[in-house]
Image (cartoon, rainbow, N blue to C red):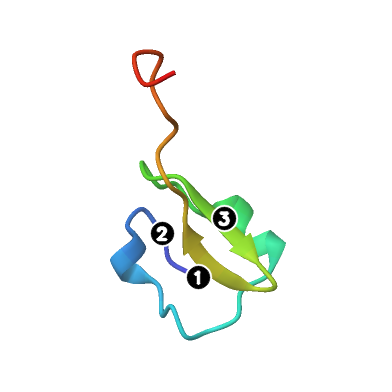
Amino acid sequence: MPNITQLSQLDLNQTYSYADYLTWQFDEAVALIKGKVMLMSPAQNVRHQ
């Protein structure tokens, strides 16, 4: 599998394993839920709290 550094390199309809997830090097925060890639919401900042 090629080095995955951007979410656009993945097929979001495909099911991925945790082993796949460990090889990804994204700047964005993503989650793997039941094999599907999900973008995570950014954390709230201190000012919002």
Determine whether 39 is above or below 26 in the image.
below
Direction from residue 1 to residue 27 in the image, left or right: left
Q: Quadrant of residue 20?
A: bottom right
| Residue located beneath label 2 in the image | 4
Per the rendering, the mark at residue 31 is: 3
Kind of residue indicated by mark 1? Met
Tag 2–tag 3 contact (CB < 8 Å): no
43 or 13, which lies in front?
Answer: 43
Label 3 to label 1: alpha-carbon separation: 19 Å
How dense is the environment of label 1, judged by Cα within 10 Å: few (below 14), some, or many (20 and up)? few
Return the disc, 3 or 1, that comes first in the chain's sequence: 1
Using the image, tell me which numbered label, if any, was put on residue 47. Answer: none
Kindly indicate the quadrant of the structure image that contains residue 46.
top left
Tell which of 26 and 31 is nearer to you. Answer: 31
Could you tell whether 19 is left or right of 41 in the image?
right
Instruction: Identify whether 24 is placed above or below 17.
Output: above
- How many residues crowd around disc 3 within 10 Å: few (fewer than 14), some, or many (20 or more)? few
Please name the amino acid that badge 2 sits on. Answer: Ile
For disc 1, the marked residue is 1
x then y, percent, for residue 33: 65, 66
Q: Residue at x 61, y 62 (%)?
A: 32
**Secondary structure type for disc 1:** loop
Q: Residue at x 32, y 57 (%)?
A: 6
Q: Quadrant of the C terminus?
A: top left
Q: Nearer the viewer, mark 3 or mark 1?
A: 3
Residues at marks 2 and 1 touching, judged by CB atoms closer than 8 Å: yes
The x, y position of residue 5, in whole percent, is: 36, 53
Q: Establish if 25 lies above or below 13.
A: above
Q: In the image as oriented, which residue stretches furthest toward the top?
A: 47
